[in-house]
Image: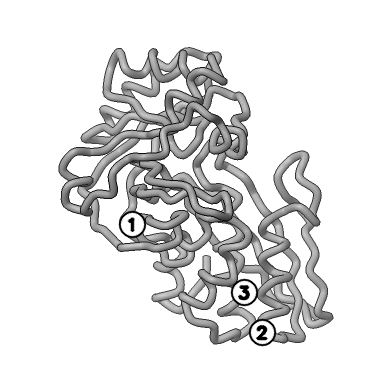
Amino acid sequence: MTQAQTRWPAPAKLNLFLHVTGRRADGYHELQTLFQLIDLCDTIAITVREDGQIERLAGPPGVAPEADLAVRAAQLLRQATGSPLGATLKVHKRIPLGGGLGGGSSDAATVLLALNELWDGKLSLPDLASLGLPLGADVPVFIKGSSALGEGIGERLTPVTLPPKWYTIICPGVGVSTREVFQSPELTRNSPVSTIRALLDTGGRNDCEDVVRARAPEVAEALDWLTQFSPARLTGTGSCVFAACESAADAERLAARVPDRWMSFVAQGLNMSPVHGLLSKGRRG
């Protein structure tokens, strides 16, 4: 037997800045980054099953079900809670793959949040964040559900309320390997640790940008094009780049000028994840 299908949003994020402050003995990097949630969302359709099976009927092109973070998240939650229930998942993508927008991590977080409610798992947000961290360093910010300063490998989060902004986002259509960027000998790893106030006041930078520019000329070209009109920045290790705008109209006008060879989006900044909006109202879309 199955229950009715419910639909859940999985928002993207931007890294408004990304400072690499050190490298740990285990090879991971210490960071300071500002996560801005945005209203560009994937949608996860979930149907609870009573046979205990986890099945994905739709997902990202070229991503096998066993490699899909949404499926792996459901499996992890079932193991952690011992739930006898299962789920059928349909992952409808709008967030570009490999763009530094956190789509896969957000899908995983949404599945954890949704199934924790649908299965009556009773895990706390910190428990879910710890459970999801091995799936990706960005999973905890989507679990906690607010724009935040991220430290450590990005999992130590301090919620922040950011001023209203709209963003024009360009996807150059190339892949950038996060692993290769962080292993690059050219990467700066000694940015000084700063206070939240100082980071918000200065706006920071992205320490990965020079490395990505050198390795992905298409990203460098998109950054240079966008910088003609507004200060532009790389999100994460890319490949997407963005510029902040004061209004939706400004962002739309800028997006309309983006050359046809690139995909572009307009997105509004969010201070709270829409998943948490649904959970707080006790209902699903």
Q: Taking 79 as reference, is 121 left or right?
A: left
Asked whether disc 3 touches disc 1, contact meaning CB atoms under 8 Å apart, the reply is: no
Q: Residue at x 37, y 62 (%)?
A: 157
Which of disc 1 and disc 3 is earlier in sequence?
3
Disc 3 from disc 1: Cα separation: 24 Å
| Amino acid type indicated by mark 1 | Ala
Which residue is found at the position 63% from the left and 59% from the top? 135
Residue identifier under label 2: 81
Identify residue type, mark 2: Thr
- Above or below residue 96? Residue 48 is below
The quadrant holding residue 133 is bottom right
- Residue picked out by circle 1: 148
Task: Determine the CA span between mark 3 and mark 2.
Answer: 11 Å
Quadrant of image for the N terminus: bottom right
Tell which of 225 and 3 is nearer to you: 225
Please state which of the two labelled residues, at mark 3 or mark 2, is closer to the viewer: 2
Above or below residue 241? Residue 164 is below
